[in-house]
Amino acid sequence: MKYIGVIFSILLLLTAVSCDKKEVPTQVIPVYDTSLELLTSNDQALAAGSGNPSFIQIIVKNEINDPVEGVVVTFTQISTQDREDTSFNRTATTNATGTISLNYFADTLVGADTIQIVAEGAVDSLVLLALTVTPAAVDTIFKVAPLAPTVFGIAGELIADTFKVQILDAYSNPVANERVLFRAFDRCVLITDSTANLSMENDSIYTRTNTDGEAWAQVTLSINPRSDGGYPNSFNMMVTSPVLTGDTIAFVLASTDPGTITYYGDVRNIFDDNCILCHPTVASSYDLTRYFTTVVNPIVIPGDTINSTMLNYAVSTHQNSSINVVEEDKVKLWIGTHNAVPGSSGLVSYTSHIKNIIDANCLSCHGDPPGPSTTYMMTTHAEIRANDVAIPADTNSTLVLKLNPGGNMRTYVSDVQADSIINWVVSDSLRQY
């Protein structure tokens, strides 16, 4: 019993001490919002099928800019294009530095792609990484058109077919802006897109592939026949690219007989396009505006390709001339095969067409012996050309005006006959044969 009082006293003391003790507050740890930030620069380009270590990098931070560890982040490729391979889809967790780095392998199909990145629980939880998949290294060049074993065309004329090739990468993606060389042989002329052309030559031409990986050229075939003088004349056109030194595309072409090369059908357009600017009148040394002023000695000596001075100037190398090698050969063939004989334009002639009309309808007044009209004799070709009543290629010639509808001489011939004579004067320069 003697200890009971002591124990009670101790309890009272402890109670008093406890009542005087102050309460210690509980510590509160603040919570911060997190946000997602893209470290990889946007709008990058990757070659198709290629990989890039640590290509995608992100960081998750809180609002006082401290990295946040343990945040789950999802990476998903989204695209408007149909894909033949598996889309990119990954999930990863931020490390102690709040970051994630992922390898990325580009699709094998070129085009624009987007990687959608979402961080769980973050306030700013979504970012988009835009990238462009470009073609891989050039792999092959192949023929698109024409696919026929041999392409035929008239000698000296532009072939209607467009010769087209395509360059692809290893995944069959078209490769744009690659240089392509078209080269033909045997004095042909090539043309291509003037905005892409890198070399203006006659038988070879550089161009570049378009966005479809395609390059094209058109060909004007050589006018020259085979060595034995016949047609068809066969030759090749080769297509290559500097980045594909081992690959060559070959087109086989064959030129067919062009027929007779005539002044009005073939040669006059060449002179009009290339020569008239400097030779519009006799005062300019050579008057190449009309048939009879062109076919004079020594400018044109029919059958003589050595001494005809025309062939010294109707060449692709002549000053200020844009004549090409096919046109050059066409003029030479025209002179050399006697189609340059005065009057041989290949169209209406005095001998074959006009003489019979005049003899039957006009000589009673304009013939020999003299009829009622002796001021204008029409018995021979020389008499018709002897004065200014009929001026070659002149629509205001008196003869033309009198034979036009309403003219006072049209009633003496039929409409067909009148138009034939008018055409002979205006279009055929009064040619004789």
Image (tube, helix red, strand yellow):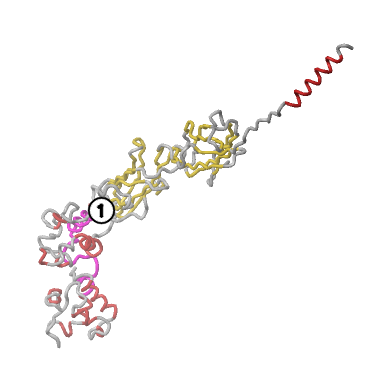
Q: Is residue 325 above or below residue 247?
A: below
Q: Is residue 419 above or below residue 406?
A: above
Q: Tell me what residue is drawn at x 27 percent, y 82 percent.
A: 405
Q: Is residue 21 above or below residue 192?
A: above
Query: What amino acid type should be assigned to the residue bearing mark 1?
Result: Ile
On-image quarter of the N terminus: top right
**Does the stretch in magenta take in 402?**
no
Q: Tell me what residue is drawn at x 22 percent, y 84 percent.
A: 409
Report which quarter residue 116 is drawn in. Answer: top right
* Outermost residue to the bottom: 372
Q: Position of residue 190 (x, y in %)?
A: 29, 50
- SS at mark 1 in the image: loop
* Outermost residue to the right: 1
The residue lying toward the viewer, choosing from 69 and 115, is 69
On-image quarter of the C terminus: bottom left
The residue lying toward the viewer, choosing from 255 and 381, is 255
Q: Position of residue 253 (x, y in %)?
A: 33, 48
> How many numbered tags mark residues here?
1
Q: Which residues are magenta?
A: 327-354
Residue 224 visible somewhere in the drawing: yes
Report which quarter residue 352 is drawn in. Answer: bottom left
The residue lying toward the viewer, choosing from 287 and 356, is 287
Residue denoted by label 1: 223
Q: Position of residue 178 (x, y in %)?
A: 36, 43
Residue 86 visible somewhere in the drawing: no
Report which quarter residue 7 is drawn in. Answer: top right
Apparent side of residue 399 relative to residue 193 in the rendered image (left or right)? left
Q: Residues within 10 Å of mark 1 (few under 14, many from 20)?
A: many
